[in-house]
Image: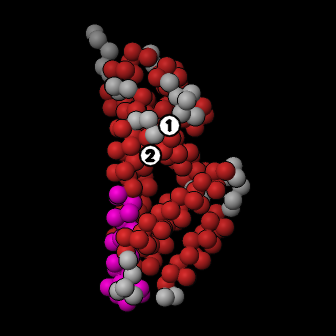
């Protein structure tokens, strides 16, 4: 009797292995062979599920980005304006080991996007989504009088994204030695200045 294969589980195994391999070996060391070995399967089995390395990396990002997206959607459904913005920004920060790991994989995608159109498209789509979320909560802040209606929402959203990116890179450059309370204090300081207008 032929062996029954759980294809969805096998795909998850490969995605998990890709994520772990990126963390351990960096993007350069994340080969199809290394990921297949980490997952406990043959290279041929991996290629059956994923066309190339970029697709595998994209799936790893998507899978582990889903958790962040769910948390952000929850914050936006439960809060609005300034309190929602604070929650969105805190969710984006590398304030614990799991989030720091996601940032390492995210930076690997940034690097890969320099030479891959597919990864560049993926990166741009994620940024559009992130900027859109921020603009929505900024607009809520304007509508309820927390912020002036003269605020350029797009420009402010870009500023917030650049700040979060900078904090994330600093965190990684320090090898994770920046405590979560320091990251939170940076965000709170920025929001105090923004909402004092």
On residue 64, which mark appears? Answer: 2
Write down the region rendered in magenta: 128-147
Residue 136 visible in rendering: yes
Above or below residue 14? Residue 70 is: below
Percent x, y of residue 141: 38, 82
Mark 1 lies on residue:
19
Total labels: the figure holds 2
Q: Residues within 10 Å of mark 1 (few under 14, many from 20)?
A: many
Q: Residue at x 56, y 76 (%)?
A: 190
Which x, y percent locates residue 158?
Answer: 43, 66
Magenta stretch, main secondary structure, is: helix
- Label 2 packing within 10 angstroms: few (<14), some (14-19), many (20+): some
Which quadrant of the figure contains the N terminus? top left
| Residue 112 position within the rendered picture, expressed as x and y whole percent measured from the top left | 47, 37
Residue at screen point 39% across, 81% down: 151
Magenta segment includes 184: no
Q: Are marks 1 and 2 in contact (CB under 8 Å)?
A: yes
């Amino acid at each position: 009797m032929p062996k029954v294969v759980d294809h969805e589980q096998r795909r998850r195994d490969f995605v998990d292995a890709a994520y772990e391999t990126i963390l351990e070996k960096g993007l350069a060391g994340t080969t199809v062979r290394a990921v297949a070995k980490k997952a406990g399967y043959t290279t041929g089995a991996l290629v059956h599920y994923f066309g190339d390395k970029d697709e595998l990396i994209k799936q790893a990002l998507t899978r582990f980005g889903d958790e962040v997206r769910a948390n952000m959607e929850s914050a936006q459904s439960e809060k609005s304006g300034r309190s929602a913005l604070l929650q969105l920004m805190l969710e984006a920060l590398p304030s614990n080991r799991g989030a720091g790991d996601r940032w390492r994989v995210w930076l690997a995608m940034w690097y890969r996007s320099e030479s891959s159109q597919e990864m560049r498209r993926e990166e741009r789509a994620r940024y559009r989504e992130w900027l859109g979320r921020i603009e929505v909560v900024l607009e809520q802040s304007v509508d309820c009088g927390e912020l002036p209606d003269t605020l350029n929402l797009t420009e402010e959203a870009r500023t917030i994204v650049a700040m979060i990116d900078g904090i994330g890179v600093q965190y990684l450059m320090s090898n994770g030695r920046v405590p979560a309370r320091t990251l939170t204090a940076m965000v709170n300081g920025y929001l105090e200045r923004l909402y004092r207008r």
